[in-house]
Amino acid sequence: MVVFFDPVLGCNLRCKMCYFSNEVKRKEMKGNFNPEDLPRVAEVIFKQALKLQIGCGAEPTLYKHNVEIISLAKQFKVPYISFTTNANLLTKEEIYRLLEAGLNEFTISLHGVEKSTYENLMQQASYDKFIEVMQLLTEAKKQYPHFNIRVNYTVNELNLVELNHFFDVYDSFAIDILQVRPLQDIGGIINHIEKQQEFNHQFNKITAILRDICKSRNITYIAPIILDEKAKENTSSSVVESTYCYISPKSFWDSDMDWRNETFRQFSKRTGYASILFKRIYSKKELTNTKLNYDIN
Ligand SMILES: C[S@@+](CC[C@H](N)C(=O)[O-])C[C@H]1O[C@@H](n2cnc3c(N)ncnc32)[C@H](O)[C@@H]1O
Ligand code: SF4
């Protein structure tokens, strides 16, 4: 499984494409994962994890026990640990503490190449602080050469064209992976693309250019293959869903699991989970249109 862990349901920013820009939704998002429960989570779930992603639907730098989560994940031999953040609260000390604990990847979210776009789309964020953190991460590679710097760029009509200048601006940063993904409607104050066809055309053009540039720089480039109706027609084995494990202060993966009192093995035995999984391998069902097929170069 890939474990997606939101240890905190809150955020310091109000990005316009994200539900944190929506007053009502923001009020619904609250809670801190009880640190005393972390060892139990690790024991029950981390053993099953091929990857742990800390920060999924909220901002993980607001949590005080991230080093503990990473240390536990290392203890249970999770092969890849990633941390997804807006970077605005990261300090040099925190970066080195997380790397020292065994973090494999920082994923930094970015909604603009230009300062004005960045600060407009990522309300309450500081572009200067973001640049400072990118410099710190690049510098940290001297001591920790094996961790990856990934940039996630969520795109809409307001920040698409400036992607053409991405490497003019961010040339000096040691980026390993660049993912560009179009906005989806998750309830933010910007929740759709006005001129979809025009956007798709531009997106495909820019993606073709970025793919080549990334290749020449030895950077992995990830973007949707297509942005038209075909993406919605795609089917996949529903086993995909079984690889997704979400944990937050409000929910714990399969609601049927009594995780405080049973082990994964006991849960599997009680529910016949192995045979459920086996059946899912052969069941085909349509992917929802929120799931895009990505091309990884
Ligand atoms: C919800 S954030 C949570 C983690 C952290 N706060 C961050 O921004 O990296 C996770 C990712 O969702 C992306 N995102 C925000 N709004 C989006 C939208 N409307 N559609 C698709 N992705 C979005 C962000 O850019 C970020 O990379
Ligand atoms: S995208 Fe991340 S940083 Fe921006 S508001 Fe949403 S959770 Fe916060």
Image (spheres, rainbow, N blue to C red):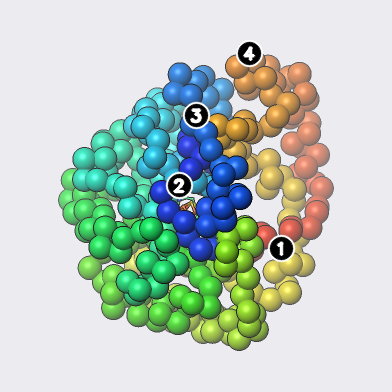
197 or 224: nearer the eye? 197
Q: List x then y, in percent, for residue 215.
A: 39, 72
- What amino acid is labelled 4 in the image? Asn
Left or right: where 68 falls relative to 191: left
Q: Residue drawn 36% across and 32% down? A: 64
The answer to whether 260 is drawn above or below residue 71 in the figure is above
Q: Which residue is mark 2?
A: 11
Q: Which residue is mark 3?
A: 33
Q: Earlier in the sequence, mark 1 or mark 3?
A: 3
Mark 3–mark 4 contact, CB under 8 Å? Answer: no
Q: Describe the element under mark 1 as helix, strand or loop.
A: loop
User: In the rendered image, is residue 265 in sight?
Assistant: no
* Disc nearest the viewer among 3 and 4: 3
**Marks 3/4: CA–CA distance:** 18 Å
Q: Quadrant of the N terminus?
A: top right
The answer to the question of whether label 1 and label 2 lie on touching residues, with beta carbons closer than 8 A, is no
Horizontal and vertical percent position of residue 230? 73, 73
Binning the other alpha carbons within 10 Å of mark 3 as few (below 14), some (14 to 19) or many (20 upward) gives: some
Whether disc 2's CB lies below 8 Å from ligand 2 is answered yes
At 74% from the left and 36% from the top, the residue drawn is 277
**Which residue lies under the disc numbered 1?**
289
Quadrant location of residue 288? bottom right
* Amino acid, disc 1: Asn
Label 2 crowd bin: few (<14), some (14–19), many (20+), radius 10 Å? some
The answer to whether any part of residue 282 appears in the image is yes
- Check disc 3 and give the amino acid type: Phe
Tell me, for residue 257, which label it has, or none: none
Q: Nearer the viewer, residue 215 or 93?
A: 93
Query: In the drawing, what numbered circle is on residue 261?
Result: 4
Residue 36: give x, y in percent of width and height.
45, 19
Say few, some or many: other residues with alpha carbon within 10 Å of mark 1 (under 14 / 14 to 19 / 20 or more): some
Q: CA distance from mark 1 to mark 4?
A: 37 Å
